[in-house]
Image (cartoon, helix red, strand yellow):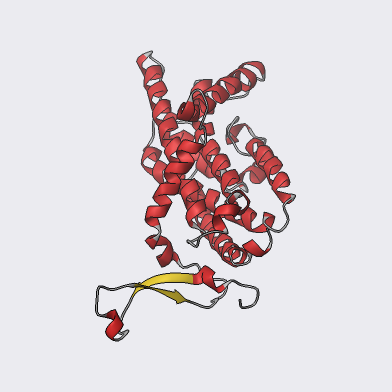
Amino acid sequence: MRDGVNATDYAESAPAAHQGPRAAGPDLPVTIIRPDRGWFDWRLRQLWRYRDLVSMFVWRDFVATYKQTILGPAWHVVRPVLTTLIFTVVFGRMAGLSTEGAPPFLFYMAGLLPWTYFATAVETVAKTFVANANLLGKVYFHRLAIPLSIVLSTFIAFGIQLGVFAVILIGYVARGTSIHMTGWLAAAPLLMLIVAGYALAFGIIVCAITTKYRDLAHVFTFAVQLWLYVTPVIYPVSSVPKRYQMLVWLNPLTPLVEGFRLAFIGVGTVTPSDVVISGAAMGLLLVLGLMLFSRVERTFMDTV
C-alpha cells in the first residue's frame, strides 16, 4: 500500500526471462508491479491485452440489458420506434414544430438515433464503479474495459436501430416521398465516432466525480433529460431565433445531430468546420476524462 493505493491494481503480465535453472521450461507468467505514474498513467497498451475481456463484456451488456423480458433484445428497436411515434404526435401534429419539409417521423427518428445512443451510453458508463463494485473488488483487470465495452455494446444496438431506420426510409421512398440524401452520408461514421467519444468522455468524468459524491448521479440523470431539449432533436437549428442560436451551437452534440440528419434526409444546418471543432472538443474532454478516471480507479475500493 503506497499513498493509499493498492499496488496490486497495477499488476501486469509478462513472460518470464532469465530466472535461472527453474525457468528452463516454457515461459511462465510473471507479475510486474508498477508504481503510480501520475495523471497520464492510462496503460492503454495493457487495455489492448484485455480485448477478449472487453468482447465478453460487450456481449454481456448487450444481452443483459433486457434479460428476462418478453421481447428481449427487440426492445432495442421497439423503444426508439415508440419514442419517435410519440414525438411525431406531440411535437409534429399537436405542437406543429417545423421539420424543414421532411416527413416528421423520419425527422424525429434521424435525430433520436444519435441522441439515444449518446444518452444510453453516457448514463450507463457513469455508473461503472458503483454498478460493478463487487466485480472490481475481486479481480484485477484494466478498469477502462467496462466503460469501453458499454460504449461498444450500445453501438451494436445503434447499428440495429439504424438498420430499422434504413428500412423505414426505403419504405417512404417506395411510396413516392422525396428524400434527398447528401454527401454527408460518407461522414456519418465519423459523426457517430465523435458521439461515442463524447459518451465515453462525459461518462467517465461523471463516474469519477459521483464515485465520491453519490448524490450527483441523480443530478446528472436529470441534466441528461434536460439536455435533450437543448439538442436539435425535436426541432431544427434553423427554427431557433437567431439571438438564441449561439447557445444552441455551444452544445457539442448540435453539429453531430444536424449532420446525421442532413446525411440521411437532407435537412440540417452544419458545416465541416463545426464538426472539426466538435471533434477537437471531444478529444480534449476525453483526455480530461481519462485523467480523472485513472486517478479515481486506484482508490475506488477504499470509498465503497
Q: Based on the displayed image, in which of its 4 quarters is residue 231 positioned?
A: top right
Q: In this view of the protein, can residue 61 be seen by the observer?
A: yes
Q: Reply above or below: 220 against 136.
A: above
Image quarter where the N terminus lies is bottom right
Locate residue 119, reporting x and y percent. Answer: 58, 41
Locate residue 71, reporting x and y percent. Answer: 48, 24
Q: Reply above or below: 272 against 300.
A: above
Q: Based on the displayed image, in which of its 4 quarters is residue 172 positioned?
A: top left
For the image shown, how many numbered marks are present on the structure?
A: 0
Viewer-closest of 238 and 9: 9
Locate residue 177, reporting x and y percent. Answer: 41, 17
Viewer-closest of 34 and 185: 34
Image quarter where the C terminus lies is bottom right
* Residue lying furthest bottom: 20
* Residue lying furthest top: 175
**Residue 134 falls left or right of residue 47:** right
* Residue lying furthest front: 22
Tell me the residue at 50%/37% (across/down): 64
Viewer-closest of 48 and 67: 67
Q: Reply above or below: 13 against 58.
A: below
Tell me the residue at 51%/43% (across/down): 256
Locate residue 27, reporting x and y percent. Answer: 28, 73
Tell me the residue at 57%/71% (across/down): 39
Q: In this view of the protein, can residue 180 be seen by the observer?
A: no
